[in-house]
Image (spheres, helix red, strand yellow):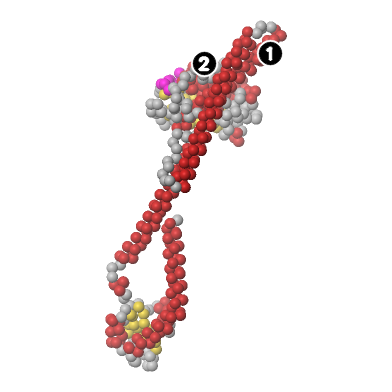
Amino acid sequence: MFVVMALVMTAVFIGGMRSVISGGWRDAGRPLIADYVDRLAAEIGTPPDPGRAKALTERLPLAVRIEGPVINWESHPGRMSGRGFESRAGELFSRTTADGHRVSFGLGSLPWQRGPHGVGWLTLGVLLLLVLAAYALVRRLLRPLDDIGAGAQRFGRGDFDKPIPIRRNDELGDLAQRINTMARDISDMLDAKRALLLALSHELRSPLTRARLNAELLPATPEGATERAALLRDLGEMRDLISDLLESERLASPHAALLREHIDLATLVHDVVAELPHEDEVELDLPPDIPLMSLDRTRMRLLLRNLLENALRHGGQSAGALQPPRLALRRVEGAVEIEVRDFGPGVDEAQIGRLAEPFFRTDSARQRATGGVGLGMYLCKLVVLAHGGTFELRNAHPGLSVRVRLSLAQPPEGDAPATIRARANRSHGDVA
């Protein structure tokens, strides 16, 4: 932009000066030049004397060419030839003597042409340096905008720990300060919302526990058995919903912390599968070269259980699939990949991108009667992101495939991904 602006300014300046000079030339310059050329032609004489012409070119920065029936002479051969010169000379720079010779005048060797030629390049270099200096100055003036843009991206990701640096006490500095204040207010509101949700969830657990206990103590009469079972089932669903809400808020909160330990992922998979009611319907592909990994055992159990239950519910043999769900572990590029795939009908491509959103359920195969409240995949994604991994959902044709990739690199002690930066420890007693 600055180079283009410099070129445009130069073109405008040169065009304007040429317009001014050409106007002045027509009004005053031409008569003066015409009179001067008459005097030069008179000094060369009639017939033209090449000796006088040569002396004239030595005294003045002029070029002279004489053409005629007797004398043909040129002080600077080649300089005054060509149509360009003829068109410019015309009647102004040439005179015809009485004996038929034509004397033409032009510019000879100018003083700056005889001097060193580095002055022009030096001038151009200085102009370019001035343009670069102006660019650097403007970039320095606009640097707070880069900081504001980066800060807005951080705040949009939910990372409010690092405020926008205040570099100057001007309008941009005031804007950065206002955005920092807004970010603090948003962070406080989110913390208050999470605290309220956690408090309500904790408070709801006690009456739910008492209600379930009272339902268990009801007399088991034949006529009330169905209502008692339905009541216990509803209370169990409410308990699970509250537990999932608590865990999702802990994982999504910037104050969450993982309790990592070195675990054998293959052994953990076996333990989780053994707890499932249809463990014989799951195929396992567990290679022996999977090393110990630093993971949160309870969160990983939650991840594996949710993925397997989802695969059994929507793509197991009990759901009409031709093959049982499969869980495979693979070691790829410094990471371990967990893939859970079912062989059911899959999910509409237009909806697959929303499966990991909280409380989302598809309209066809994954309804609430068979798919819970829509927090399972959301919790799985939060667990993976908390461990610094990647979470991918795709249709495998047939069925749905969920791929989780966890890095084998040991995280720094006490550190966690930026999205769940650890600030406070907590126990696992309330994990679902």
- SS under mark 2: helix
To which residue does mark 1 refer? 227
Q: Residue at x 34, y 82 (%)?
A: 64
Q: Which percent across, then down, holds residue 386?
A: 47, 28
Q: Which percent across, then down, holds residue 181?
A: 49, 38
Between 184 and 318, the one lying in front of the other is 184
Between 329 and 12, the one lying in front of the other is 12
Write down the quadrant of residue 229 in the picture: top right
Between 401 and 262, the one lying in front of the other is 262
Q: Which percent across, then down, holds residue 83?
A: 42, 78
**Vertical arrangement, residue 327 with respect to residue 181, above or below:** above
To which residue does mark 2 refer? 274
Between 274 and 206, the one lying in front of the other is 206
Q: Residue at x 50, y 26 (%)?
A: 251
Which stretch appears magenta? 260-267
Residue 384 placement, left or right of 116: right
Write down the quadrant of residue 196 in the picture: top right
**Vertical arrangement, residue 424 with respect to residue 20, above or below:** above
